[in-house]
Amino acid sequence: MVNLCKSMFPDSAIAQAMSMKRTKCTDLTKALGTCISNELVSKLRINKFSVIIDETTDVSSTKCLIILVKFFDQEAKLMKTGLLQLIDVYDENNEMVGSTGENLYNLIVNTLNAYNIPLDNLVGFAADGAANIMGGNNSISSRLREVFPGLTVFKCICHSIHLCASESVKHLPRHCEDLIRNIFTHFAHSAKRKYELKLAQTFLDLKPHKILHACTNRWLSLHAAVERVLEQWDALKLYFSRIEDQERLKSVESIVRSLKDPSIFLYLNFLNFILPTFTRLNLMFQQEAPTIHLLHDNITQLYKNLIRYFCRRDLVDKANIVSFDPSLCTNHMPLNQVYLGSKVHGLLQLEEYNRDQEMVNDVRTRCREFLIRMCQQLKKRFDLDNKFFYMASFLDTKRCYKSKTRELLPTLHDFSMSVPRIYGGNLQDLDNEWRNLDSTFIPEEIKSCSITDFT
C-alpha cells in the first residue's frame, strides 16, 4: 500500500507515508468509489450526455456490460468520460439475463433510472456494430431510437476502421501475419532465445529491441509488430539460420521459409507503408476532445488518397467521389504503376525482383486488391455523403470564421434539427450568431483554440 501511495501522491509527503492493511484499504477504496460515482451522477443530472457501451469477458469468464458516459462539464469547461456502471450480464439477480438487444437495453435504462438521471439528458449512444447492438430490429439502438426520438446513434469509428482493415487483409497471403505471430511466440517465453537474438543484434550493430506482440482481435495493432520485425530483419535471419538445424521445429522451419521469401518482405513493407494511415486515424478519434467535426474531411481524404494509389488520377479528380467505383477495371492505372510505398518501389528496382516478374505481378495484384477492398469497406461503413457529418465539419475552428463557410452553410437550421435533443434554444438566435461570426471581431488566440474552448 505504501508503494501505491507513493505513485498516487508524488506531490504529498504526508499521503506517501500513509499505510493500511487489506480490510481498511478495501473499505477506503469502496468509499472513494462511491464518492466518485455520486459526483458523476450529480453531473449527469444537470448536463447532456451520451452513453457508450461495450461487452467484455474477464479472466473468470464473467461477461460484463460496461456503461460509460461522455458529457461536457459546464463547470470545468471540459469534455469528460466516466464509468457509470459495470454489470454482470448473466447475474441471476437481474430480471433480464443474457446479451440480447432487449436485455441490454433494459440494463442501460434501469441503470439510469436507478441513479435518478433524467432520460431527457440522454442525447447520444455509441457502441460497436454487433447485431444485438446496432441491428435494424430488436437491437439496443432500434429500441433507443423508438423510445428517445432524435437520439444520435454512432457506431464506434475506431472499431469500424479496424473492421475495414481486417476485411482487406484477407487478400494478402496468410503467411505474412503468421510470420509476425510465430516470431513473437518463438521468443515470448525463453530468456535464452532472447539473449541469443540480442547477440545477433549486437553483431549487426542493431538496437536490441524486443519483438512485439500483435493482438489477435485488434488487427491494426499489427503495424507496430511489422515495423519491429522489419527493423530487426537481418538479425532475425541470422538468428534463425543458426538454429534451424539445431532445433528442427516445424515453427522454426516455417519462419525460415518466410524470411527467405522475397515476396513476404515486399508484403510486410507494403503493410508498414499503409497501416500507419489507419492507426493515425484511430488515434485521432480516441482523444478526449470532440472529434465529430473531423470525421467527414478525414474519412473523405483517406478514401481519395487510397483510390489515387491504384486508379487513374485524371478520372479520380473529376469524378463524384461518392459514386466512383474503385473496383471498375477501366478506372485502374496499369499494374506496374500501382503505388505501394517508397520502400516497395525501391525494392522492385533491384535485380533480385526483376528476375521474377511473375512474383512481382502477383504481389502488385494482391496489394491492389487490398486497396480496393479497403475502399469498399470505407464506403460501406462510413457514409461519404452523410449530410450531418458534412455540416459538422464546418464547426472546425479552422473553417467556421471564414466568409466562404457562410456560402456553403448559410444556416444551422438543418444541423440543429438533426440533433434535436442537444439544442433546445431559439434557432433564429443561433443562426444570427452563426451568420455574423465572420464579421465579428474575435482575438486570434480564440480563433486558434480547440472546438471545446470555442463553444
Image (spheres, rainbow, N blue to C red):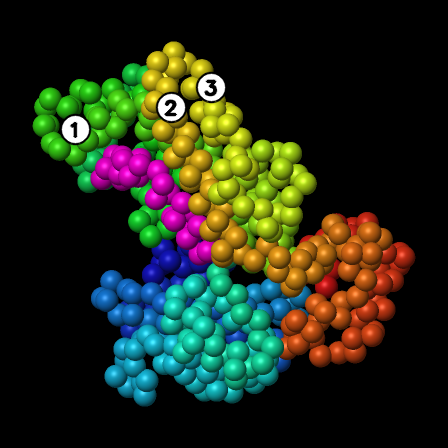
Identify the amino acid type marked 3: Gly
Q: Earlier in the sequence, mark 2 or mark 3?
A: 3
Q: Residue at x 15, y 23 (%)?
A: 243
Between marks 1 and 3, how big is the CA–CA gap? 29 Å
Q: Residue at x 62, y 54 (%)?
A: 296
Q: Which residues are magenta?
A: 158-185
In the image, is residue 56 above or below residue 39? Answer: above
Instruction: Please name which of the two marks, 1 or 2, marks the residue nearer to the observer.
Output: 2
Count of marks placed on residues: 3
Q: Where residue 134 appears, x then y in whole percent?
A: 44, 69
Q: Where residue 143 appears, x then y in whole percent?
A: 47, 80
Q: Is residue 67 visible?
A: no
Q: Where residue 396 appears, x then y in whole percent?
A: 70, 55
Q: Where residue 391 appears, x then y in whole percent?
A: 69, 60
Disc 2: which residue: 360
Secondary structure type for disc 2: helix
Identify the amino acid type marked 2: Val
